[in-house]
Amino acid sequence: MNGILHISWQEIQAGNETAFRVLYDEYSELLYGYGMKIIDNEAVVMDAIQTLFLNIFEKRKRISAPKSIAAYLCRALKNLLFNELQRSPLRKTSELDENNGKDYDFTLEPDVESRLINDEQEIEGLKIFKQELDKLSHQQREMLYLRYYKGLDSDEISDIMRVSKRTVYNTINNALTRLRSNKELMSFFGDATLMVLLGLNEFYGL
């Protein structure tokens, strides 16, 4: 996802209202889905998205054109939500500091919409699949989500998560290798179906 070709950042900087509306319409769904993975609170996420676009409008003349609009927006939203996590009475600030603000749970579900699951064995397989996804690190789940569920490339993910492109590549491939190493899981689905359930249509596409 490399940004909207029919919107120039110059239009945003100039305060073009139509450009802002298109920007919001094009990216609000991506931001909502991503934000809800970081904080499972719709009100907080929606407030953060509104704050993000308000900040862009107010600071538009000082914001350089990003290489990727999607990456810029996701990173900015993530920062806002981390600030919210630090203010939350349910989180310990010391824990957030020690983990560089990464004290959050990033859940990932199988892409069941891509395939009808009716067989009892397949349903049992999905339970095992979800358990294996839960065993991955939050970083692995987040990268899988951004790359394959949302279609961002490795450059964009490295920008959002502040890691190298090589780290993105290795982290994703380690996660996939771990999933595929579960013999019980593979006996339920096989490699091809497993990739479909994860939405991984470009398994070697990094």
Image (cartoon, grey):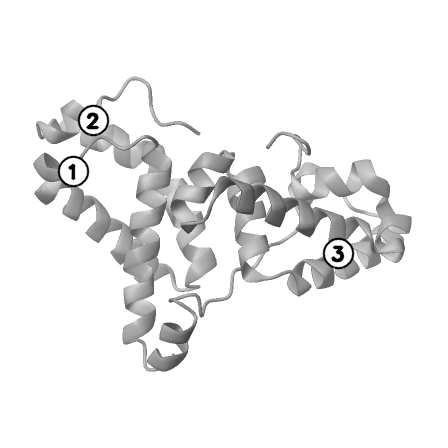
Contact, mark 2 vs mark 1 (Cβ under 8 Å)? yes
Q: Nearer the viewer, mark 2 or mark 1?
A: 1
Pick whichever of labels 2 and 1 is earlier in the sequence.
Answer: 2
Q: Picture coordinates of residue 162 (x, y %)?
A: 40, 50
Residue 175 has which mark? none
Residue type beneath disc 2:
Trp
Q: 10 Å neighbourhood of mark 3: few (<14), some, or many (≥20)? A: many
Residue type beneath disc 1:
Ile
Say above or below: 98 vs 53.
below
- Which image quadrant: the N terminus? top left
Residue 78 horizontal side relative to residue 115, left or right? left
Say above or below: 184 vs 68.
below
- Which image quadrant: the C terminus? top right
Q: Nearer the viewer, mark 2 or mark 3?
A: 2
Instruction: Say which quarter of the image contains residue 22.
Output: top left
Residue 90 visible somewhere in the drawing: no
Secondary structure under tag 2 reads helix
Residue named by callout 1: 63
- C-alpha span from label 2 to label 3: 42 Å
Pick whichever of labels 2 and 3 is earlier in the sequence.
Answer: 2
Q: Nearer the viewer, residue 74 or 97?
A: 97
Secondary structure under tag 1 reads loop
Q: Nearer the viewer, residue 85 or 45?
A: 85
Q: 10 Å neighbourhood of mark 2: few (<14), some, or many (≥20)? A: many
Q: Picture coordinates of residue 95 (x, y %)?
A: 41, 78
Q: Picture coordinates of residue 170 (x, y %)?
A: 62, 46
Residue type beneath disc 3:
Phe
Residue named by callout 2: 9
Residue 129 has which mark? 3
Instruction: Say which quarter of the image contains residue 137.
Output: bottom right
Report the residue at 15% width, 48% height from top: 55
